Image (tube, coloured by chain):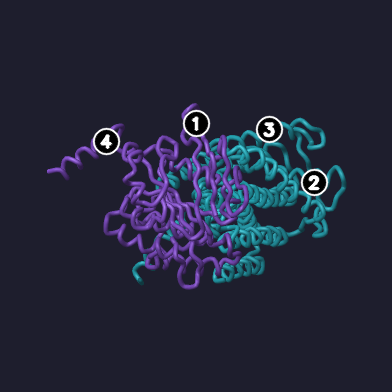
Chain colours: A purple, B cyan
Amino acid sequence: MLEASGLTKTFDGLTAVEGASLHVERGTIVGLIGPNGAGKTTLFALLSGFLGPDAGRVVFLGRDVTGLPPHLICRLGMARTFQIVQPFGAQTVRENVAVGAHLRHRGRAEALAHAERIAHAVGLGAELDKLAVNLTIAGRKRLELARALATGPALLLLDEVLAGLNPQEITEVIPVLRGIAAGRDGTPGVTVLMIEHVMQAVMNLADRVYVLANGRMIAEGAPAEVTSDPAVIEAYLGHGAAERLRRAYGAAHAA
Amino acid sequence: MRGLAGIAAFAVAIALMPAFVTSGYALNAMIMTLYAALLGQAWNVLGGFGGQFSFGHALFFGTGAYTMAVLQVNFGWNAWAALPAALAAGGAIGAAIGALTFRYGLRGSYFALVTLAFAEVFRILANTFQFTGAGVGLMVPLSERAADMQFATRAGYLYLILALVLVGFLVSWWLKHSRYGAWLQAVRDNEESAAALGVDVLRVKLQAIVVSGVLMAAGGAFYVQYLHYIDPHIAYGPAVSVEALLAPIIGGMGTVWGPLLGAALLHVLGETTRNLMGDAPGINLAVYGIVLVLMVSFLPRGVMGLLGTRRAARAAGDA
């Protein structure tokens, strides 16, 4: 469904993403993890058209979408959320979600009705008439999700929708995400590519995981494989960490 | 649909006015208030609903006014034929300014400054060219026939401006209840988010400045027909730009009734100032300035915001 190859982006001599490739299969949930500053959000911006890559290309649903503006990519069926939530603050939850719904619904009444359905699906049903500025962080994260979902995407790019939530809230949102991916009430499932730091969620949800470090893809595979990969451990904990961990664990086993 | 009923009721009430009010002073006050409301409605489309604060709406006003005057005076056009041309000219200037500014991502104070600068450039041009009457201005021949869009009584002008304000109302109502309006307000609140939800931000802004320009040009055209005279300072000077933005800021930006409410309050304020302080030059502008500062500091959502908050509080109480 999504095929990115050799994506590179440089800002004033600083290479944020270098030759990154990834592949997302229809109907799967793919995780994108990596230490802070690895270039994950930049990679999302390259995929969704907010930034144009210096090199590489993005193919979505068999179409080359490299360099297309974001609104056209969204129309083709790729929707994204923002790590730093960006609600339309002066508008209600219903109006916020309706902006997304208008992409596939011309009429105001239809869009508002669709927005209501989506809001219920992500657990915002009780807050439809609240102004977006008055939502809690957890509420705003759900709003990001609802708006993106309302555009009727085939592929959803989620940029840390769980960051800033407490463990209770995370436990509540995980089934919502699984429901979106699986599809329900006759709606088709949505393929998901998610940036996530909450490992509980990644291990729980993702079918496959990519690891980005210093702008490069350093590992790819099932979540359990990837998290025990020495290269990944070193990326997170520093050079030599894998070796030290192995020795420490080895010593523990020997004792 | 309740909103439309309110607009219709307002139109009927104003249309009945000449049957009861005969005082020329009172009718003139209504005409000037509706005229200020029209300028406010025009600014409100781009500034209130679209979040693009123009400080040079005189650009569209003056272009509408001059198109109206030049076509009648220099080319002998009928006023009713000149009106669509004036509206088109306002829209065209809107498209041109929009293409220049929005394409390069100018926002906020930069956008405001560019509009102000363009209005000044046009003022100087109008001051220079012979076909605009240069510094002397243009006088539209008096005819007082409806066929020339002139009227022997004030009531005629009241109906004319009422019709234009009704168009402004319908545009505002449509922005509140349509997909395009939802997109425009989304762009106002967060461009990035809007783009991420499939909104073509540039296109939406361009359409807004064109609609705004057309409505503002209608205000300019009305001015020429009502007062029969236009000169560069009236047409492209900052006074009109300020007048256009004051009404919606005071009444409530991005609301249907804000511009009219603001225009009415400003009219009362202007008259009171004149009664209290006499015709000292510039005193009304000083008062407007103070009101503007107070509004922005204490009531950023305008008088409608005050009403809206109370309504919301009531709704919350019911729930």
Give B99 or A45, whichever is nearer the viewer. A45
Q: Are marks 1 and 2 in contact (CB under 8 Å)?
A: no
Q: Are marks 2 and 4 on the same chain?
A: no
Q: In terms of sequence position, does the residue under pointer 1 or pointer 4 come before the other?
A: 1
In-front residue for pair A15/A22: A22
Task: State the residue at coordinates (72%, 38%).
Answer: B231
Q: CA distance from mark 1 to mark 2?
A: 59 Å
Question: Dot 1 lies on which element?
Answer: strand
Q: Nearer the viewer, mark 2 or mark 4?
A: 4
Chain letter of mark 4 equals A
Give me the C-alpha separation between circle 1 and circle 3: 38 Å
State the image quarter where residue B111 is shown.
top right
Q: Residue A11: which disc?
A: 1
Is any atom of residue A188 visible in this view?
A: yes
Distance between mark 2 and mark 4 Cα atoms: 91 Å
* Callout 4 secondary element: helix
Residue reaching furthest left? A255
Q: Amino acid at mark 2?
A: Val
Could you tell which of marks 3 and 2 lies nearer the N-terminus?
3
Please tell me the numbered disc located at residue A243. 4
